[in-house]
Amino acid sequence: AKSWILAKHFNGFPKDSDFHLKVEELPEPKDGEVLLEAVFLSVDPYMRPFSRVHMKEGDVMIGTQVAKVIQSKNPAFPVGSHVVSHSGWRTHAVSDGKDLTTIMSDWAPDVSLSLALGTIGMPGLTALYGIEEVLGLQKNETLLVNAAAGAVGTVVGQIAKIKGCKVVGSAGSDAKVAYLTELGFDEAFNYKTVPSLEEALKKAAPEGYDCFFENVGGHFSTVALPQMKNFGRIAVCGSISTYNDSTPQIGPYPHLTMIFKQLRMEGFMQNRWEHKHPESLKRLMAWLKEGKLKSREHITKGFENMPAAFMGLLQGENIGKAIVAV
Ligand code: NDP
C-alpha cells in the first residue's frame, strides 16, 4: 500500500519536497473491517488550510476517495461494492466502516463514480446549501460567483440558472470563461486580464448583485462588496486567494459598505446540513440526468501524481472538479 505523507508543513505554495511517498504492508482486515482500494481520489482547496490546523508532519494527507471493497469482514460493505471513504491520500486502507458512505443505490450506471467526489458529492452539496440555506436565492435575482469554473462554482452557476436567476461568474482563463458561457452563465469574465475588476463587475451587472457566492476572498471580496445591492446576501464559502499566504492579509475591512448597504454575510461549511445529504444528492443526480446540470472533470492519472494534481489545483489548472484516477 502507498500513501502520501505531509513531510513538511507548507510554507507559501506547497512544493514537491513537502510530500513523501510511503510504502507499507497493511494488516489483514479483522471482523467488522474491510480492505479498500482507491479508484478515484479528490484533491480539494481545503486541504491547504486544514493541513495547518488538523495535521502534523508525518501524517497521511487528509482527503476523500471513491474506493472499491476488495476484502470484507463487514456485511454492510460486500466485496466489489464502492464507497466514499475519508482515508486520505492512500492507495489502500483498512476500515471498520465508520468513515464510509455507500454510493447511493440508484446511482445512474452511465455516470462515473468519480462524480461522488464532485457534482454529486461534497462540492455539489456545498453549492446547493450555499444557494438554498445561506443565500435563499430567489427567482430573477442576480448572483455573482467567483472561482466559477471550479468544482463548486460550476454547480453554483447552474443551480442559480435552474432557479431562474441572472448569473455572473469570474474565472482565471479565457478557456474557463468560454466554458462558463457554455454552461449558460449570463456573463463571465477573466479576472486576471480585465483592466479593472470593479468595472468588469459593474459592466456584467449594472443593476448590482443580490447575492454573492464567495469562494476567493482577499482583493476580490474587497472590490465586490461595494457592487452589492442594498440588503444583499453573501455566502462565504471559501477564501482560496489567501490559503497560501505565509502571513495573513490584514483588511481593509468592509464594515462601512456592510453598514450602508445593510448586507448580510454568513460563513458556512457544507457539513452543517449533513442530515440532508442523502436527499440532496438525489436532487443533484436528478438534475444531472435531466441535463440541467453538466459536469466536467480535470483528471490526473496516477497515484504518484497526487501532489502535482493538488499543486495544480491551487494554481488554477483545473476546469471543473480536480480528480486523481489511480
Ligand atoms: P476549484 O475547483 O474551484 O479549484 C480552485 C480554483 O480556485 C482554481 O481552479 C482557481 O481558478 C481558483 N484560484 C486559485 N487561486 C486563486 C487566487 N489566488 N485567486 C482567485 N482564484 C484562485 O475548487 P473547489 O470548487 O473545490 O473550491 C472552491 C472554493 O470553495 C474554495 O475556496 C474552497 O475552499 C471552498 N469550499 C468550501 C466548502 C465549504 O463547506 N465551505 C466546501 C468545498 C469547497 P481560477 O483559474 O479561476 O483562478
Image: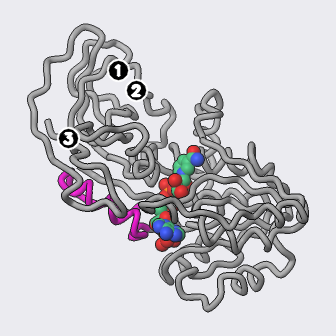
Mark 3: is the Cβ under 8 angstroms from ligand 1? no
- In the rendering, at what x and y percent does residue 232 appear? 84, 60
Where are the magenta residues, as a range? 295-318
Taking the image as drawn, is residue 296 in sight? no
Q: Nearer the viewer, mark 3 or mark 1?
A: 3
Give the mark toward the camera: 2 or 3.
Answer: 3
Amino acid type, callout 1: Phe
Q: Which mark is nearer the camera, 2 or 1?
A: 2
**Alpha carbon of mark 2 to alpha carbon of mark 3: how far?**
18 Å
Residue 144 percent across, percent down from the top left: 71, 67
Q: The residue tagged with tag 3: helix, strand or loop? A: strand
Question: For mark 1, what is the residue?
Answer: 77
Q: Is residue 301 magenta?
A: yes
Q: Quadrant of residue 143?
A: bottom right
Residue at image mark 3: 3
Eyeballing the image, is 200 above or below 272? below
Marker disc for residue 100: 2
In the image, what residue occupies the spot 87% across and 77% down?
207
* Number of numbered labels in the structure image: 3
Q: Are marks 2 and 1 in contact (CB under 8 Å)?
A: yes
Report x, y in % for residue 57.
26, 41
Which mark is first along the chain, 1 or 3? 3
Check disc 3 and give the amino acid type.
Answer: Ser
Amino acid identity at mark 2: Leu
Q: Give the mark, 2 or 3, whose residue is nearer the N terminus.
A: 3
Mark 2 or mark 1: whose residue is earlier in sequence: 1
For label 3, the crowd category at 10 Å Cα-Cα, with few meaning under 14, some 14 to 19 and many 20 or more, is: many
Instruction: Please indicate whether residue 285 sits to the left or right of residue 236 in the image.
Output: left
Question: For the point 24% across and 49% down, which residue is it?
Answer: 8
Query: Residue at the location (21% across, 11% down)?
Result: 30
In the image, residue 212 lies in the stretch drawn in magenta: no
Q: Is residue 84 left or right of residue 80?
A: right
